[in-house]
Image (cartoon, rainbow, N blue to C red):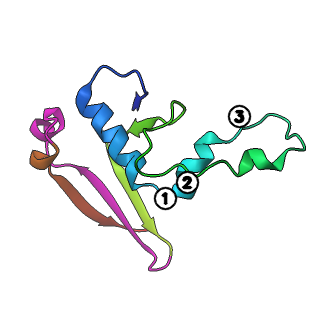
Amino acid sequence: MTVVKVDDQDSHLLQARETAWKRMSDGARSQFAWPHPGLERGSDDSLFSPDPVTQESAPLEDFCLLVLDPAEVDHLNLKSNERYLYKPGGPENREEKDEASASWSRLRVNP
């Protein structure tokens, strides 16, 4: 897992962080302007209604992007009662960091 923070040196990861920020709703972005989570809540409820944080706003410093690099995925669909295991197609694909060239195999298994 990679955590992309405001001071990351990789320009591609910083661009991905900004893209993720812009794809969020105004309400979701505004939550990053709230007081620190887990601390005692004071009586000033206006702190939870900050000015709208719009798409045009730069990502706030507290916003981090998590980039996951899974080794496998176990997907259980409770509505259809189906389960699938996804694994990289082969070792040569696992080493390849280009997402377009990486293929995954899918195996239907018992739930």
Q: Which residue is mark 2?
A: 28
- Judge whether residue 80 is colored magenta: yes
Residue marked by disc 1? 25
Q: Amino acid at mark 1?
A: Ser
Check residue 46 for magenta coloring: no
Q: Is residue 48 visible in this depiction of the protein?
A: yes
Q: Look at 43% across and 27% down and name the residue there.
A: 5
Q: Please provide percent x and percent y for residue 104.
A: 19, 53
| Circle 1 crowding by C-alpha within 10 Å: few under 14, some 14–19, many from 20 | few
Task: Judge whether 38 appears above or below 27 on screen.
Answer: above
Q: CA distance from mark 2 to mark 3?
A: 15 Å
Label 3: which residue?
36
- Give residue 77's quadrant in the image: bottom left
Q: Is residue 70 visible?
A: no
The span shown in magenta is 79-98
Q: Disc 1 versus disc 2: distance between alpha carbons?
A: 5 Å
Query: Quarter of the image holding residue 15?
Result: top left
The answer to the question of whether label 1 and label 2 lie on touching residues, with beta carbons closer than 8 A, is yes
Q: Position of residue 62 (x, y in %)?
A: 55, 32
